[in-house]
Image (tube, coloured by chain):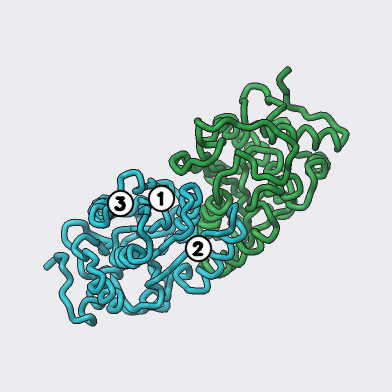
Chain colours: A green, B cyan
Amino acid sequence: MIEAVVLLSGGMDSLVCAAIAATKHKHLAFLHLNYGQKTSAKELECFEKISDHYQIPTDHRKIIQMDFLKQIGGSSLTDDNITVKNYDGDESTIPSSYVPFRNSIILSLAVSWAESLGARHLYIGANFEDSPGYPDCRPEYYKAFNELVRLGTKDGDIHVHTPVIHMKKSEIVSEGLRLKAPFEMSWSCYARTDKACGVCDSCALRMRGFKEAQTVDPITYQG
Amino acid sequence: MIEAVVLLSGGMDSLVCAAIAATKHKHLAFLHLNYGQKTSAKELECFEKISDHYQIPTDHRKIIQMDFLKQIGGSSLTDDNITVKNYDGDESTIPSSYVPFRNSIILSLAVSWAESLGARHLYIGANFEDSPGYPDCRPEYYKAFNELVRLGTKDGDIHVHTPVIHMKKSEIVSEGLRLKAPFEMSWSCYARTDKACGVCDSCALRMRGFKEAQTVDPITYQG
């Protein structure tokens, strides 16, 4: 019997979120949503490696192709005509990598799978501290989503958990190290898949996190 | 400039919802989600006919393939191993045609497209009176969803409308007739695509609606 579904993108936040879920539940299922972003093949590879690491049986891993999000557009992650903007230090604006209402789409699918499996818990590595520009990373958004789940599911008994939402990136790194999360299997770069670019928003946040945690990131950066 | 997105399944509730939206907004966009149900080809045909009727330009019609919902399972609409149950008159139980949390998936996608288009309104033909068994057809569910949209979108300024939610099926028929909605272009049957079966949950509700509105349904029924 599956107790919890974990949304695992392959990034470091979702990796540490999975590591935390693994301390609380014995039987987990991992869900990966591939929404056609430029680095999707690399993230899928990370998903499989991390799933192996946590010994998730094959039938409790699910990958959903969401290429149709490309049709909706409006984001540099999915629209090839928009360039991924480098990190400019302004955290009050919404990054060009924003997909409208993306987390609601992801969470709704995950709740649907969780209900099918009979799982009562859902984990997502949403992080507010380093992503204040994303409206669907705010704690009050998750409060509203949990209310929606209570009202919109058969038994109203599935709970969405965001264990890293209030952590700084450096705290996520420290927590991951404490739980022996395999950071070398994770990927954060939005722009490249061979070596991390080191200049996109996501690389900048990750690098600062490892630096502030005073430890070395095991992945390779360009240059 | 698109003012509103209408979710149009091809059923009579969404048709009348579109007819109502057309009285309030000049520039509409129609969205059809094909989630791999048994009658999807027929519903797609209805979507195109109804879009022609309301003169929606081709680039403001969108069809999203959601075949992946089949992978999630748990519903007779998408899982070939579950039989569509005939209507048994018990409206307090959840029908076998229930897809877990389906409306949240649909609405989240629609909000994403609406935000991309700059549309501030979204219409869905959810109906509570004749579908009390579906948790995500309840008015309080939509109240919670609107709160989620307020918190989860960039400007917090997209509003989900459910104009037929409190209508009985017969009132939906009457309102549709008043607005000259082309009922002959709509389809409700879950089981067949040539003639409506007349015995599934959805046919039973539609037939009762037309009967109570004391008018004739223009579509053809089997037998």
Dot 3 or dot 1, earlier in sequence: 3
Where is residue A30 shown, x and y percent of the image?
A: 60, 46
Residue lying at the far right of the rendered structure: A214
- Residue found 25% across the figure and 60% down from its top: B191
Which label was assigned to residue B159? 2
Kindly identify which residue carries mark 1.
B70
Kindly identify which chain the residue marked by label 1 belongs to. B
Q: Amino acid at mark 1?
A: Lys
User: Do the residues at discs 3 and 1 belong to one chain?
Assistant: yes
A198 shown above or below B142: above
Identity of the residue drawn at 48% across and 70% down? B135
Residue under pointer 3: B56
Give the residue displayed 58% in from the left and 68% down from the top. Answer: A150
Give how far apart the Cα atoms at labels 3 and 1 are.
Answer: 30 Å
Q: Subunit of mark 2?
A: B
> In the image, which is nearer the foreground, mark 1 or mark 2?
2
Q: Earlier in the sequence, mark 2 or mark 3?
A: 3
- Whichever of labels 1 and 2 marks the residue nearer the N terminus, that label is 1
Give the chain of mark 3. B
Label 1 sits on a secondary structure element that is: helix
Point out residue A192 in the picture as x, y percentages from the top left corner. 62, 25
Q: At label 3, which amino acid type do we have?
A: Ile
- Residue A183 numbered mark, or none: none
Please, what is the three-letter code of the amino acid marked with disc 2? His
**SS at mark 3?**
loop
